[in-house]
Amino acid sequence: DSGVTQTPKHLITATGQRVTLRCSPRSGDLSVYWYQQSLDQGLQFLIQYYNGEERAKGNILERFSAQQFPDLHSELNLSSLELGDSALYFCASSVDPGQPQHFGDGTRLSIL
Amino acid sequence: GIQVEQSPPDLILQEGANSTLRCNFSDSVNNLQWFHQNPWGQLINLFYIPSGTKQNGRLSATTVATERYSLLYISSSQTTDSGVYFCAVEETGANNLFFGTGTRLTVIP
């Protein structure tokens, strides 16, 4: 058990819809990262938050947004969903950048 | 951005055999991690090893940062070792991990 909790584990929805993925980091970790794993793109970094502030952005689409709340949990919002958004979305956390990142079990998103 | 190459892409082993997986990276890093993704999709953190050598049971890893590569050794492989092994690096000055494309390991009884 990594200590990082992601909900839901599975999500099935239709094109055009909006979903929210939730992540609770390990106790004491201030950094939260979101990654997307798709068949054609592999594992890609989306966005990082540190103690409530956005710190780094990767290949995140404009239709996607995230935030980190004062209790350090984070949410990833995906809107206007397309078939290509079907993927496994991971959240990871670390004490600081440069320190080991610990991954949750992921949310498997299927767009029908 | 930094390039991460893993080899071999696929590996099939008989149970009990040993193997070495390699990860080459193109720039200096301040974090390197090895992960095992099991058949259920979970990413299991094996090693945090930006430099040096570490061992954990049948697994060990070595990173030679000056030569920009890392090796993961699996000894006496078991069927439960099957899955995809990823190397991921955090480039110096960056805040995220770049993942390689992985080595898919299949251990047959």
Image (cartoon, rainbow, N blue to C red):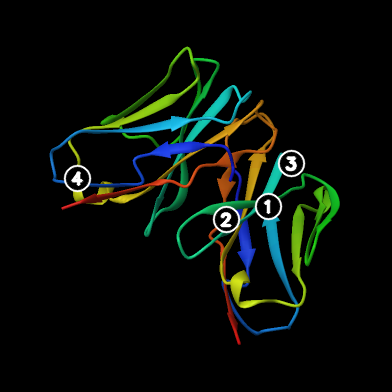
Q: Name the residue tied to disc 2.
A: B100
The amino acid beneath tag 3 is Ser
For disc 3, the chain is: B
Q: Secondary structure at mark 1?
A: strand
Alpha carbon distance from label 4 to label 2: 26 Å
Q: Secondary structure at mark 3?
A: loop
Q: Name the residue tied to disc 3.
A: B28
Say whether residue A35 is left or right of residue A111: right
Same chain assignment for discs 4 and 1: no
Say whether residue A110 is left or right of residue B51: left
For disc 1, the chain is: B
The image position of residue B55, as x and y in percent, is 83, 57
Task: Kindly report which numbered mark, 2 or 3, lies closer to the viewer in this rendering.
Answer: 2
Mark 2 or mark 1: whose residue is earlier in sequence: 1
Q: Secondary structure at mark 2?
A: loop
* Circle 4 crowding by C-alpha within 10 Å: few under 14, some 14–19, many from 20: some
The amino acid beneath tag 2 is Gly
Alpha carbon distance from label 2 to label 1: 9 Å
The image position of residue B72, as x and y in percent, is 74, 63
Residue at 40% across, 54% down = A41
Q: Secondary structure at mark 4?
A: loop
Same chain assignment for discs 2 and 1: yes
